[in-house]
Image: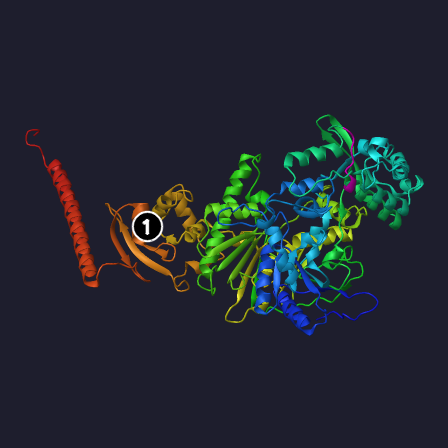
Amino acid sequence: MLLDFNAEPRPPRLALPVGVGIGKTRAMQRSVAGLLRSEVLRGRKVVIGVPRHDLAEEQRDAFHALDVDAMVWKGRTAPDPTPENPERLMCLDPSAPFDAMEVERIVETTSCKVTRRGITHICPLYNSCGYQAQKPRLEAAQVVLTAHEALFHQAPNELGAVGLLVLDEGFWGAGLRGTDGKALLTLDGLRPHLGTVQCWTLRNHEDWEATADLAAQRERLWKVLATASNGPLSVAVLRAAGLTPERCRQAAGLEHRRMRNPGLTPGMDPGERRRRIAAVLPKEGEPWAPPNRAAAMWLLIAEALENDHDVAGAVLVDTMSENGTVRCLRLAWRADLRNGWGAQGPILHLDATLRPELVTPFIPEVTIAEPLMAAEPHVRVRQVLRAPVSARALTPGEDAKPRDRSAAENHRRQVSALIALRAASLRGRSVSPPDLLIIAQKAAVDALRATGLPRNVQAVHFNALSGIDRWRSVAGLMVLGRTLPAPLTVEALAAAVTNCPPLASRGGVDWWYEQEERRIALADGGAHVLPGEVHADPTAEAIRWTICEGELIQAIGRGRGVNRTAATPLEVDLLTDVVLPVAVHEVLDWDEVCPSRQDMMAASGVVLENAADMAKAFPDLWPSREAAKKQNQRRGTNCYYRDLSNSNLSPSSSIVAYRPAGPGQKDRTARFDLALIADPRAWLEAKLGPLAHFEMISGKAPQHTTPPIADARARLNALSARLDAALAQRITHDRARLTALSHRMEAAQPNPAAA
């Protein structure tokens, strides 16, 4: 283990950037198992935070294999499906916890079970509740796995003492509050008068001393709010109004005392519960600032005063309501990791895309270690620039112009063909399916699935990839596009992380990023230069990079390139203009890769040679024989995956000879991919009509269920019938020619009557 548990005077806290696929999670699991066996933790638990519950369950199974008692802790709103009720949640009465939170009560003692004055109040669903059923396992477990989000909420008492907190993958996003723009405080609710500052004792008696203290600080704040312009609250004006960090923190504590105790108990009738809640809340339409939210405001102001910067987490805005425009404070802030989960003890943070700017605000005294990376000699990366794979290029909105929708349809067809061709080149190369993994934005993935993906292809979307190991044996990865929010979104997230106004940063277009020169590192030592987005503010840039480049790195890492050998290479196609910290073997332009119409035809499993047949079989590609003939004349000028049309390089490829029935038809050839079109003759007859001749020239013929001798006789009979038909057709044709010649000769003879 990398942590020194005897460090003084502060517990050790280490953040370790580890490359994707190196095996950081498995190494951590083995280290934790050894740590527990060594008794260094003295019976205290290890808590491991992960992005999602499915990853927690994978780690639980891995710990069990190491003979470590591990369990997954889930919150009340987490799914707990059963065959009879797939929508079941951990808490069977979710309205009760929400009611408790509305009036800022402790959920466990308000909604689940509590003993007061010798009387036990209990929820009637307590004994069948999934949330309660996990508590005995929690008490006994050595390792507790939970989602990052849970670490920012109160830990259950049954957890006990924690000796080590492990944060696996990036966790900062789970600790942000108000980033949806809905954490608002109306100025009317903050105006200091008795109805908005009245404080109460624990027994619901008026606390006039606390009320006076809170009113004094609200008066100082109101002097600022009443005259301030829209935007972050000015630290200079707040200080001039007489506010100090100490006064703000005192006010934050007093805000909580504005909420009276409604006397809720577990098992209370829902109607009675709502009646009691209504009795302690203001009537609808009356000014009100929710105490928890108001307390968060004061803490943001205190932090800004201490660090001498404007309050980016508290911004004056105008919002629309049913009654018109309303002046509000819009809040966004960073929650703290809770002590009950081990936040005050030793911490180990592991992340492949770790950015110090997003770790130190949550763990101030953390040590950032040097990155641990590994070479990937058996990974080949091709990067395709200017590909039409953005959300707008593939999935424009409903209000898009007709020409944009038409262009998007063409782009989807091209990308689908590219995927099919790539899948054909990789078919059978993976130890287990799929052979090819597609990673793109969710809307693009849905659109590509709707058009139909090859059987050996799977598609997944960004933002749901970290930690997943199931695609470690794929032969190929294709990454389409990127995720990148607008600067305003990134700046709002940065403000929530730091509470400090981010530096202004705009490029040539006032709503987009600045551009700077970036260099793609080529495997041969060279570089390919292209522009890339950047934000001037360090925290905003860290967020932009994590969402964009970081997610692409996570995508590539799904193939576990570091574990590949010469026998199990990985091929990666990056269809994005983003520069990543990976060695690229080939940089191409979309024009070099964009599938031609022949490529699209090949992607369906067939390559026809005859222009008329091409137009008849693929009218969406060639509206006429002349169009197909012109395309044939340009063949080969734009086919990156030419080898897919080469039967010598495609083990499932077969050449057939055929001739459609009818006069004047000639023999022609076609190439079929039998993995996609198992019966070429049936396909040809479905597209072109009856055939006068068909023969498999190379490759395996379709499998027949009839005995070999009977099959041979049937083929001979069919051949004899086709020869008879051809001979009869030739005789008929010759007779017609002779008859026509006889008529012409008779017409040329002199007419005696005319003489």
Residue 430: say if magenta.
Answer: no
User: 534 or 324, which lies in front?
Assistant: 324
Q: Is residue 374 visible?
A: no
Q: Which part of the image, by quadrant, shows the C terminus?
A: top left
Q: Within 10 angstroms of label 1, few (less than 14), some, or many (20 or more) residues?
A: some
Q: Going by the image, does 86 lie left or right of 329? A: left
Q: Residue furthest bottom?
A: 38
Extreme-front residue of the structure: 118
- State the image coordinates of residue 310 (x, y, percent, origin top left): 85, 44
Q: Tell me if 588 is positioned left or right of 507 in this view.
A: left
Query: Front-most of 118 and 48?
Result: 118
- The single residue placed furthest to the left in the displayed view is 752
Question: Where does the N terminus fall, quadrant-wise?
Answer: bottom right
Q: Is residue 441 above or below residue 752?
A: below
Q: Is residue 203 left or right of residue 715?
A: right
Which is more toward the observer, 334 or 566?
A: 334
Give the magenta part as a residue range.
286-292
Predominant SS of the magenta segment: loop
Label 1 sits on a secondary structure element that is helix
The structure's colour scheme is rainbow
Task: Depth check: give the residue in front, 57 or 415.
Answer: 57
Instruction: Give the total of numbered labels.
Output: 1
Q: At 33% across and 46% down in the image, what residue appears?
A: 687
Q: Residue at x 64, y 59 (%)?
A: 138
Q: Is residue 278 left or right of residue 501?
A: left
- Given the image, on which type of amino acid does mark 1 rest? Trp
- Residue 658: x and y in percent read 28, 53
Residue 642: x %, y % from top left: 46, 58
Residue 153: x %, y % from top left? 71, 51
Disc 1 designates what residue?
Answer: 683
Q: Is residue 287 magenta?
A: yes
Q: Is any atom of residue 113 visible in this view?
A: yes
